[in-house]
Image: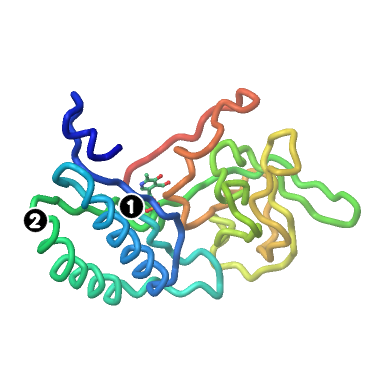
């Protein structure tokens, strides 16, 4: 099949493999990249010359208390070895790229939404905000996460204040999925206050169902 491409009327460039996202284990990323290169070398035996090798993204960022930043030096060493010992000798025409998403923009983004109501239900205190999963699907825990965990969250206009209450921060959509903070300890927030989610620059606006229920889209501000 790959060999047939040489005779077909297509411009075959090479391979693009994306193994997954939000990985904080340098060992696992190195292993995925090694296996990807092995696979491509194997396929290259039967393919036209390879001019492009894309090893995908997947570099994670810390969102939660126990997360540690990725150790880039191990990945850099592994990539240098793969280039020097495997790709350059065996695929000399190949341009090699990685395409990082989250690692580049995730930590740069802050999502700000306003409290429009406070209410108590079955003994729980809720802060209802004018945003929600239609702006920040990943922060709501509905973007492929197996276990939902809270993004770092704060009351933006009360940053110096001590936490006073445990609340659920919910969006304005008609679904219990629309949860931005589950049992989070925050200073007491009033209607009009600003709820802030950090690490929100990736898989927010671009991954969210912005048209859901016809609420206004978020405003993106580049600072
Ligand atoms: C094909 C492809 N490349 C790159 C990325 C970026 O991944 P990451 O944010 O893990 O770096 C994605 C994300 O889904 C993807 O689907």
Check the picture and name the quadrant holding the N terminus.
top left
Q: How many marks?
A: 2
**In the depicted structure, whether residue 72 falls above or below residue 168:** below
Which quarter of the figure has residue 188? Answer: bottom right
How far across and down, in percent of the image, does residue 111 sit? Answer: 49, 48
Judge from the rendering whether residue 221 lies leftward or rightward of residue 140; answer left or right: left
Q: Residue at x 56, y 72 (%)?
A: 65
Residue 113's x, y, as percent?
A: 56, 44
Q: Which residue is mark 1?
A: 56
Q: Counting other residues with Cα less than 10 Å from the Cα at mark 2, is it few (<14), some (14-19), or many (20 or more)?
A: few
Earlier-in-chain disc, 2 versus 1: 1
Could you tell me which secondary element the residue under label 1 belongs to? loop
On residue 17, the disc is none
Which of the pair 31/141 is nearer the observer? 31
The x and y percentages for residue 181 are 66, 55
Q: Nearer the viewer, residue 167 or 160?
A: 167
User: SS of the residue at dot 2?
Assistant: loop
Query: With respect to residue 165, does 206 lie above or below?
Result: above
Residue at screen point 68% across, 43% down = 178
Label number found at residue 92: 2
Q: Quadrant of residue 215?
A: top right
Q: Is residue 5 above or below residue 146?
A: above
Q: Nearer the viewer, mark 2 or mark 1?
A: 2
> In the image as oriented, which residue stretches furthest toward the right?
122
| Mark 1 Cα-neighbour bin, 10 Å: few <14, some 14–19, many ≥20 | some
Does mark 1 have its CB less than 8 Å from ligand 1? yes
| Front residue of this view, candidates 156 and 32 | 32
Give percent across and percent down for residue 156: 54, 55
Displayed quadrant of residue 2: top left
> Which residue appears at 57% of the width and 51% of the height?
139
């Amino acid at each position: 099949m790959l060999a047939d491409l040489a005779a077909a009327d297509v411009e075959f460039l090479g391979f693009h493999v994306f193994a997954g996202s939000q990985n904080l284990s340098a060992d696992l990323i190195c292993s995925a990249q090694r296996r990807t290169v092995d696979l491509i070398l194997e396929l290259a035996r039967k393919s036209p010359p390879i001019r492009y090798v894309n090893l995908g993204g997947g570099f994670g960022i810390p969102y939660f208390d126990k997360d540690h930043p990725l150790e880039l030096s191990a990945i850099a060493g592994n990539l240098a070895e793969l280039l020097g010992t495997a790709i350059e000798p065996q695929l000399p025409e190949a341009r090699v790229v990685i395409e990082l998403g989250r690692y580049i923009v995730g930590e740069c983004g802050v999502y700000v939404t306003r409290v429009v109501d406070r209410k108590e239900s079955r003994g729980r205190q809720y802060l209802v905000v004018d945003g929600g999963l239609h702006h920040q699907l990943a922060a709501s825990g509905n973007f492929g996460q197996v276990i939902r965990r809270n993004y770092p969250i704060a009351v933006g206009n009360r940053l110096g204040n001590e936490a006073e209450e445990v609340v659920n921060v919910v969006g304005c959509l008609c679904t219990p999925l629309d949860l931005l903070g589950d049992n989070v300890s925050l200073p007491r927030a009033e209607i009009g206050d600003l709820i802030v989610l950090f690490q929100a620059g990736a898989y927010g606006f671009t991954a969210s169902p912005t048209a859901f229920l016809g609420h206004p889209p978020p405003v993106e501000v580049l600072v």
